Amino acid sequence: MILSRSRASRKPAPDAAGEGGQGAPPRHVAIIMDGNGRWAKARRLPRLAGHRAGAEAVRRTLRAAAKLGIECVTLYAFSSENWKRPEQEIADLTGLMKQFLRSELDEIHAANIRLKIIGDHHAFEPEAARMVDAAVEKTAENTGSTLVVALNYGAQDELARAMRTLGERIRAGTLEPAGVTPALIAAELDTANLPPLDLLIRTSGEQRLSNFLLWQVAYAELYFTETLWPDFDEAALAQAVASFGKRERRYGGL
Ligand code: IPE
Ligand code: IPE
Ligand code: MG
């Protein structure tokens, strides 16, 4: 007789030592925060108003994630393809990033949250890049949860950089081609040492990854919602986490 699988039998990923059991929240949630422009358009407001409202949604979501006991939150804030946007919009987004750090960093630090960046934020204007560096440094020793922000991030670029590093090691003779394993590649990615990705959320109804965490998504649960990012809130996150709780994760096994 085939028994139906309950959440209790949810197996940890091969590399997910210590994952919680039944009803445990996802350890690592990543969010593609999409729909700021459409939110603004629906209100006949400039796109900047949508991005401002999006920053408010980030504040709400971080507080909600802490309440839900999520260990690591990764936010897609700016992709390596977002440079295609008009200069003014890039300047507005950079300005909002600086404003966010000015207003939120103390609270983030006080909450014992460690800030980590994936991608290369040094492509932003120097003052913004310096502020990000300072924030990372300030929170580096924090031991609570981790907030990962993807800035000028693209998964294909991340993989290319990792391959280059491994290629250099092969050329130097310290690594055999046969020694290139998934674990070795994972260790060279920007996400090395983070918990395995459990849940990927994308807002605004789009159902694509837009070059986000292509490697890490291998066994993540995907959650798409029509909610536009500026409308995302505690209830929306709780709903995504509840959906995750009902998923049956098999990792290819039975
Ligand atoms: C997400 O909202 C924010 C960033 C990509 C920086 P969008 O700006 O992509 O909003 P839409 O997709 O145009 O509605
Ligand atoms: C993905 O959203 C990037 C971020 C949310 C930062 P986009 O709005 O850039 O994605 P596409 O262009 O619709 O795929
Ligand atoms: Mg978009």
Image (cartoon, helix red, strand yellow):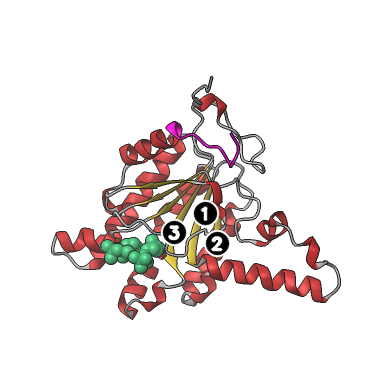
Kindly identify which residue carries mark 2.
118
Q: What range is drawn magenta here? A: 245-254
* Callout 1 secondary element: strand
On the image, the x and y values in percent for residue 231 come to 26, 49
Given the image, on which type of amino acid does mark 2 rest? Ile
| Residue placed furthest toward the bottom | 87
Q: Is residue 247 magenta?
A: yes
For the residues labelled 3 and 2, say whether their Cβ atoms are less than 8 Å apart. no
Q: Residues within 10 Å of mark 3 (few under 14, many from 20)?
A: many
Disc 3 secondary structure class:
strand
- Which x, y percent locates residue 3? 52, 21
Q: Earlier in the sequence, mark 3 or mark 1?
A: 3
Residue 77 falls in which quadrant of the image?
bottom left
Image mark for residue 76: 3
Density class for disc 2 (Cα within 10 Å; few <14, some 14-19, many ≥20) is: many
Left or right, 172 with reference to 31: right
Q: At label 3, which amino acid type do we have?
A: Tyr
Amino acid type for the residue under numbered disc 1: Val
Q: Quadrant of ligand 3?
A: bottom left
Q: Quadrant of the C terminus?
A: top right
Q: What residue sits 14% from the left and 59% below the top?
A: 43
* Residue at point 63%, 61% (across, down): 189
Q: Are marks 3 and 1 in contact (CB under 8 Å)?
A: no
- Magenta part, dominant SS: loop
Marks 2 and 1 in Cβ contact (< 8 Å):
yes
Task: Tell me residue 249's x, y (percent).
Answer: 52, 37
Q: Residue at x 31, y 77 (%)?
A: 88
Give the label on residue 148, or none.
1
